[in-house]
């Protein structure tokens, strides 16, 4: 699949950091930065842009905050066409905490929100655009949103200036049928806007759902190296770049860094296909109960875990 | 997806045995048999039907042979509607080694062959049908077969009495586009026959390719518990049963046996998504070089492994 409009955003440090509270040292993030840049990836999402008033630096590594000092230490003076992105969660950042683009190493800020917060997200995104950033809105957990509520959120987004809207399968619950359904809905509701897709791998469908997104005309693709991300992880960058036949991509730096860093890391930090995440995925539930099961010293009875979640799924 | 014609064949012991030379003890195979039966799976493929003249029992476990004594020890007198299958490889079994169906615990023999051996496969399959078995032919490694050669094989199969023909992605090289291409080709070339699909997970597409096969009208689906199978493994039974909305399926016995047996087993025996298998998959190569890399005490340089296989892929 070679379509020049397609752009890949690798969010290994941002989504992977959800597993270890962004406790990546500078050398790690620098190596990821260099490898992604050499691989021809379009954007690296290096962390969250969060307020230091909301979170502490003792509990969270630097990439929860992405201060300019943090960014400069890692990015240095390397010549690259790869752009840098950070994600902002609604309610966890103040407008004034965001510097002007001219004073930042960041190129893009992606605003993540639930459907019910879309007005706040649009306001923050417009603010980021005024400050000079590329901006997107990533509408999370839509597999659980009532269609009427989603349609209203899409109407608001259609009226906004935000140029890129992401379809997000937060729970890893979608099959290709759902991806095609949502992609069509978003395309019809959001004329003139570019679409993106962010998937989770609870059912081993993160990569194939991303491909289905491409087929449905989505051009902004999220992935993570070796699939590293919260819970079951994401669409693996190495698979995605190999699928995209664009000659600008080179998977060899990704293969090398997987061997150097990510295979050893995966022996210590858990992500990927595991039955607790599979169960939350097939039941279209937030992965938090799966993460709790995986973090326990001993796995709970998984048959019982499935039955409990199926019959009396806790309200969120 | 609920289509009553769909039948699931679990080949955990047969394909998983390729990893450990079928060194499963009777208790293991019995537990798999009971769990699959309780889960409502249609067929269990319990091993290969091979000649004891071709392989030794010291190197290979019982499920390389599936003698009637082996089968009876495990199947016992349990009441079940689940049928038993064994696979026969061309050249590794003599016609006279196959007992009559009336004297066997097996219900089905699936004949696996390469396109160039299709005449021998048809002859063996017809022989099995005469002896009273359900029979299929599984055409392996078609992602590497020249189209003319494949068309000729399909012509021969169309003229045969064999009622079920499998599309097999031996190298885990196919994307959904290829699955749809082959499914259409097989359907057009094989009027009146039922189609099956057997996938490998080198690119994390075994499950999604199976779904694409279903969408393309394929009704016989292979899977393995927890994806256990050679190299990157197969389409996981637990995911497939959950996707198929047929109320006859119950994934709870599969979840329970994964926790009891397969999670501990996976800590000792390697299968699943690993970069050497990913590389053979994206390059459409036999997994043997990936298996060699994985079996080495220390992984080879994977970037070099990729470059060597890409630039000078060894002839097979």
Image (cartoon, coloured by chain):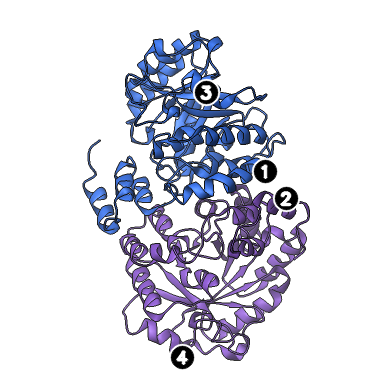
Chain colours: A blue, B purple
Q: Secondary structure at mark 3?
A: helix
Q: To which residue does mark 1 refer?
A: A252
Q: Secondary structure at mark 2?
A: helix
The answer to which of B181 and B294 lies nearer the viewer is: B294
For residue A208, above or below residue A58: below
Distance between the alpha carbons at the discs numbered 2 and 1: 8 Å
Question: Residue A71: which numbered mark, if any?
Answer: 3
Say which chain tag 3 marks: A
Residue A22 sits in quarter = top left
Q: Of the residues under marks 4 and 2, which one precedes in the sequence? A: 4
Give the residue displayed 48% in from the left and 64% down from the top. B228
Q: Secondary structure at mark 1?
A: helix
Distance between the alpha carbons at the discs numbered 4 and 2: 53 Å
For residue A109, above or below residue B234: above
Q: To which residue does mark 2 refer?
A: B307
Circle 3 or circle 2, nearest the eye: 3
Circle 1 or circle 4, nearest the eye: 1
Are circles 4 and 2 on residues that touch, CB within 8 Å?
no
Q: Is residue A208 visible?
A: no
Circle 1 or circle 3, nearest the eye: 3
Distance between the alpha carbons at the discs numbered 1 and 3: 25 Å
């Amino acid at each position: 699949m070679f379509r020049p409009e397609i752009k890949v955003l690798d969010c290994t440090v941002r989504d992977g950091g959800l597993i270890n509270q962004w406790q990546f040292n500078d050398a790690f993030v620098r190596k990821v930065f260099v490898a992604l840049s050499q691989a021809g990836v379009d954007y690296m999402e290096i962390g969250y842009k969060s307020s230091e008033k909301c979170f502490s630096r003792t509990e969270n590594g630097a990439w929860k905050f992405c201060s300019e000092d943090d960014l400069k230490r890692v990015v240095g003076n390397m010549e690259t066409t790869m752009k840098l992105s950070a994600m902002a969660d609604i309610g966890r950042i103040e407008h004034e905490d965001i510097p002007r683009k001219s004073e930042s190493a960041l190129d893009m800020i992606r605003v993540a929100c639930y459907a019910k917060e879309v007005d706040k997200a649009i306001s923050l995104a417009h603010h980021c655009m005024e400050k000079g950033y590329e901006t997107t809105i990533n509408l999370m957990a839509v597999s659980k949103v009532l269609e009427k509520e989603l349609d209203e959120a899409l109407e608001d987004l259609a009226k906004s200036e935000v140029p890129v809207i992401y379809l997000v399968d937060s729970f890893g619950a979608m099959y290709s049928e759902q991806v095609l359904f949502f992609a069509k809905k978003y395309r019809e509701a959001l004329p003139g806007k570019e679409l993106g897709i962010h998937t989770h791998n609870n059912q081993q469908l993160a990569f194939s759902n991303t491909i289905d997104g491409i087929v449905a005309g989505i051009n902004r693709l999220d992935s993570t190296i070796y699939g590293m991300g919260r819970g079951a992880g994401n669409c693996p960058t190495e698979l995605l770049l190999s699928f995209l036949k664009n000659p600008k991509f080179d998977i060899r730096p990704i293969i090398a860094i997987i061997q150097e860093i990510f295979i050893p890391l995966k022996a210590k930090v858990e992500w990927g296909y595991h039955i607790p995440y599979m169960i939350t995925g097939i039941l279209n539930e937030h992965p938090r109960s799966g993460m709790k099961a995986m973090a326990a010293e001993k796995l709970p009875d998984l048959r019982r875990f499935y039955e409990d979640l199926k019959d009396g799924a806790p309200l969120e």
